[in-house]
Amino acid sequence: MILVLELVEIVAALALLYFIAMQVFIPIVRGTPLYPMFRREKKILDDLKQARQAVVESDLKKEVKKTKERI
């Protein structure tokens, strides 16, 4: 029983170290924001915002082209 508890303790410690490495140390080395796991939604929202902006820009370019053709 004691061996099982020690094994669970070791696994928990390794899981904690893995989490810290993936969420803190690696982002620090790469120069990216900390805790990327919690920032997924923000990245997707930023991508959506950029896509919408690209659509608006494309529509404006078409309008400019039509206006220039009329001149």
Image (spheres, rainbow, N blue to C red):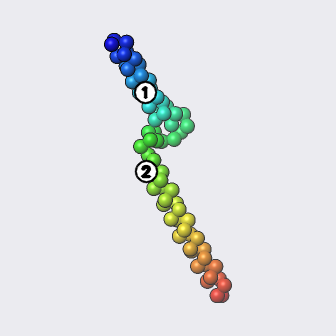
62 over 51 or under it: above or below: below
Q: Position of residue 43 (x, y in %)?
A: 48, 51
Which residue is at the far bottom?
Answer: 70
Tag 1: residue type?
Ala
**Residue drawn at point x = 44 percent, y = 31 percent:** 19
Q: Nearer the viewer, residue 64 or 62?
A: 62
- Residue at image location 47% in from the left, 53% down from the top: 44
Work out whether 28 lies above or below 68: above
Residue type for callout 2:
Glu
Q: Secondary structure at mark 1?
A: helix
Give how far across and how far down residue 5 sits, in percent. 34, 16
- What mark, if any, has residue 41 been given in the picture? 2
Camera sees residue 28: no
The one nearer the camera, 28 or 35, is 35
Residue 15 tag number: 1
Residue at coordinates 55% horizontally, 37% vertically from top-left? Answer: 30
Residue 49 rendering spot, x and y as whole percentages: 48, 60
23, above or below 71, in the image: above
- Alpha carbon distance from label 2 to label 1: 24 Å
Residue drawn where x is 44% and y is 39% of the image: 35
Instruction: Tell me the element at label 2.
Output: helix
Question: Residue 66 is drawn in which quadrant?
Answer: bottom right
Q: Can residue 66 be seen in this snapshot? A: yes
Q: Count residues near mark 2 (Cα–Cα under 10 Å), then give few for <14, some for 14-19, many for 20+.
A: few
